[in-house]
Amino acid sequence: MSSIQVKHGAVGRPVSRVDGVVKTTGKATFTAEYQLDHLAHASLVPAHIPRGSVLAIDDSSARRLPGVLAVITRENAPKMRPAEIFGATETEPAADASSIQHLATDEIYYYGQPVAVVVAETREQAEYAATLVRVEYAPAEAKTSFAAARGTAVMPADVLGEPAEVRKGDAERALAAAAHRVDHVYRTPPMNHNAIELHATIAEWSADGQHLTVYDATQYVAGTHHMFAKKFGLDLENVRVIASFVGGGFGGKGTAWPHVTLAAAAAKIVRRPVKLVLSREQVYYTVGGRTPTEQRVALGATSAGRLTALIHTGITETSRHNEFPEMFTFPARHLYASDNIWLQQKVVYLDVVPNTFMRAPGECPGTFALESAIDELAHEIAMDPIALRMQNEPDRDPSTGALFSMRSLREAYRVGAEKFGWTRRRAAPRTTRDGRYLLGRGVATAYYPTHQFPSAARVEIRADGSVIGQSSAHEMGMGTATAQAQNLADQLGVPLERVRFEYGDSRLPEAPVAGGSNSTVSVGASVIAACDAVKRKIHNQIVEDGRSPLFGTRFEEVLFHDGGIYRRDDPARGETFTAILQRFGKAMFDARGDAARDEAHSRYSIGSYGAQFSEVRVDEETGEVRVTRFLGVFDCGRIINPKTASSQFRGGIVMGIGMALTEETLFDVRLGRIVNPSLAEYHVPVNLDVPNIEVHFLDVPDPQTPMGARGLGEIGITGTAASIANAVFNATGRRIRELPITLDKLLE
C-alpha cells in the first residue's frame, strides 16, 4: 500500500507530483524491487509455433542445472480454474487477458504462449534453464496474416457495447451525388507498448496455502484481485494484490497476462515466494499490443464545404481467444454533422497474441484516417481545413442525437490558430522551403470520450487534524495521488499539506481499471461521496451538542474550511475537527463513499476535444521528416492540476509522433512471430525526435461531470499522427495513407 504525504497546493493549481521526491531519490518501490525472504525466480518457456499442440516436453537438462528448483508444465501445474476475461462481465471486476488456460492445456494458440515455467534460485539460472527445455510440437495450420484474412472479416456482435454498424440516410448514394468527394483507404500497423517498467509479478503463499499475496505491475488491482480468487478457488479476503508504483502502462498492464497467474502457480509448487519479470522480448511475445487497421474513409461535400456523406468502414484483427475490436469508427460517430452516415467495423480472427488497449485504442488510429480524409477534402475544395471542420460542427451528437454536455472545439481551434500562426501557412503544397528542406504545417482534431466507472473510496479525519483518503486506485505516472489529494483538501477544507492519499492495494476500497482516461473522474466522484458522508457524520455528531457553536444547525447551513466546520452565515463561528474529536474522545471520523456511473452519461454526449497543430521539415534529398513545432489546445473540462495535466498531454503527443514517423511492429506471417521485439529495432521517439511541445487547455468546467473534469490521459495521442501526415503533405505534396511515414514512402 502506497502512502504519499502532500506538500502544498489546491485544485486548479500546478502542484508538483507528490511522488516526485520518492521516485527521483530511488525510494519508490516498484514491483520487481520488493525484497522477500527465500525469494526464488521464474522464467517462461515460450512456444515456437503459432498453432498446434504440445506432444512432449523434455526438461531433464534444465532440471539438472545447479539452482533449478522446478520445471512446471501441464503435468505438475497446480489446478487453476477459469476466470472471466476483461470486459466479459459487469457484475464484478475481471482482468484475465484471454480465455486460454495456460499450463492446463496442450493446445498452442500463438507464438510465444508459455508452455512451461522454470523456477530457480536466481533469475540468471532460471532464464538459462528455460533455454534448455525442449518442446516437441504437432503443428497445425495457423492463420496469421491480416492481409490474407481480410476476406474472412465479420462484424462482431458489438464494439465495446456499441453497435458495430451505424447508418443514417443513404451515405453511398449521397457520396456519388456530391459536388466534391474523397474516397481512400488508410492503414495503420500493429504497435506495441513499451513502458519503462517491465511487467513483473511476485507471489507468496501462506504456509497453509489458503492466503495469497501478490505484488504486480498492474493497472487494475481490483480485477487482478478477483481473478486470483477465481483462479485458485480462494475467498476474496484471503487474496491481497499490491501495486504501489507502476512504471508506465499505456493499457498493456490493464489486464492480467499469463505470467501473472503463472508466478502464483510457481510459488505454490516450490512453496516459496517467486518473482517473475518478463524480458523486453517476452513483453512483445506475451503482452498484446495495438491491432493493425485497414480503414476506408469517404467524404462527400458541397462546394461550400458542407458534408453530405460520411463513410468510415474497415477491418481490424483480434485473436480467437479474446474479443477486442479496435473501435476506430468512434471519432466519426461524434465529430462531424452529416445527414448521411455509414460507419461499420469488421474483425478477422487470427492465431496471434491477444491484442489489447493501447493509449486511446480505436480513437488513435481512427483519427488518423478520418482527420487525414478531412484534410484531403479541404484540399479538394480549396478550403482552409480549419474552416471545413468548423463548417461541419454539429449542434448535437451526430450518431445519437444527444446534447453535448459541453463542447468548445471552436474555441480550441480559434486559440490554437492564433497561437500557432496558422494564417501564415501557405495552402499550396511545396511552396515553403528552407534550402533543401521543405516546410509544412498541418492540423487535426483530437477526440476521446469521457468515461466514469463505479468506484469506492474511504476518508479518515484524524484527531491531529490530518486527513487520509484511500482507494485501490493506481499511480502509473499520471498524477492520481496528487489530483486526489487536491480533491480531498478542497472537499474538506483542510490544508493540502495535511492530506495523504493511499492507493494501490486491494485491501482498500475498489477502484476501476486505470484506463480509458477515467481515473480522475471515477475515483474523484467516490472521494467526493466519502467526503460528503464524513461531513454529515461530523455534523450529526455536533448538531445536538449544546456545547457546540453549531448546535441546532441544518447541514445546509454549515461550511467546511480551515480544518473544521463553521456556520455559513458566520464563517468565523465554528470549531475544528480536532476540537470535536477531542471533546468526544474519538480518534477519527471516517466514512466510505461509493460512486456509480453518473446518469449524465446516458443523457449527454460527453467527451474531450482538442486541436493539434504541427510543423514539419522534410529533407527533399533524403526524405527525412522532422517535427519542428507542435501545439495542442484541449477542451477537457476543469483541469485539476495544470502541471501533471501538461505532462499527460505531452506524453500522448510524443507517442503520436512515434506513431506517425517510427513505430511499427514487424510480423513474420510464416512463423507467426514478431521480428523486432526490442527497443533497438522497434523505434520509439527519442529526445532528438521531439520538438518543443506547447500545450494549452481551455479549463472550463463541464457541468455534467464530477469536479467539472473530463479525461485527458489519452486524448493527446489522438489526431497527432494525422496532423503530422497533413503537414507532410503540405510540405511535399505527397499524401501518405499508411503509417509510419518512413523515408521510402516519400522517395518513391
Image: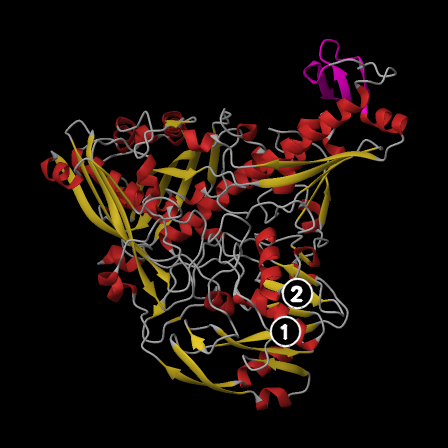
Question: Is 518 placed left or right of 623 in the picture?
Answer: right
Q: Can residue 496 be seen in this view?
A: yes
- Circle 2: is it few (<14), some (14-19), or many (20+) Cα within 10 Å? many
Q: Mark 2: which secondary structure?
A: strand
Residue shown at 44%/44% (left/top)? 653
Q: In this view, does 377 lie above or below 52?
A: above
Task: Determine contact: label 2, label 1, CB under 8 Å.
Answer: no
Residue 563 in the magenta stretch? The answer is yes
Answer with left or right where residue 646 lies relative to residue 661: right
| Residue at image mark 1 | 266
**Residue 734, how many percent across, how many down?**
23, 49
Quadrant where the C terminus sits is: bottom left
State the CA–CA distance, disc 2 to disc 1.
10 Å
Here the colouring is: secondary structure
Place residue 481 in its image quadrant: top right
- Amino acid beneath label 2: Ile
Judged left or right of residue 171, residue 643 is right
Say which residue appears at 48% left-offset and 39% top-offset. 451
Q: What residue type is labelled 1?
A: Ala
Vertical placement of residue 485 versus 320, above or below: above
Which badge, 2 or 1, is on the more N-terminal residue?
2
Do we see residue 690 in this rendering? Answer: no
Q: Residue 185 carries which label?
A: none
Quarter of the figure with residue 154: bottom left
Q: Which of 342 and 198 is in front in this view?
A: 342
Residue 131 included in the magenta stretch of the image: no
Question: Which span is picked out in magenta?
Answer: 554-576
What secondary structure is marked by label 1?
Answer: helix
Please state which of residues 654 and 63 is positioned toward the viewer in this rendering: 63
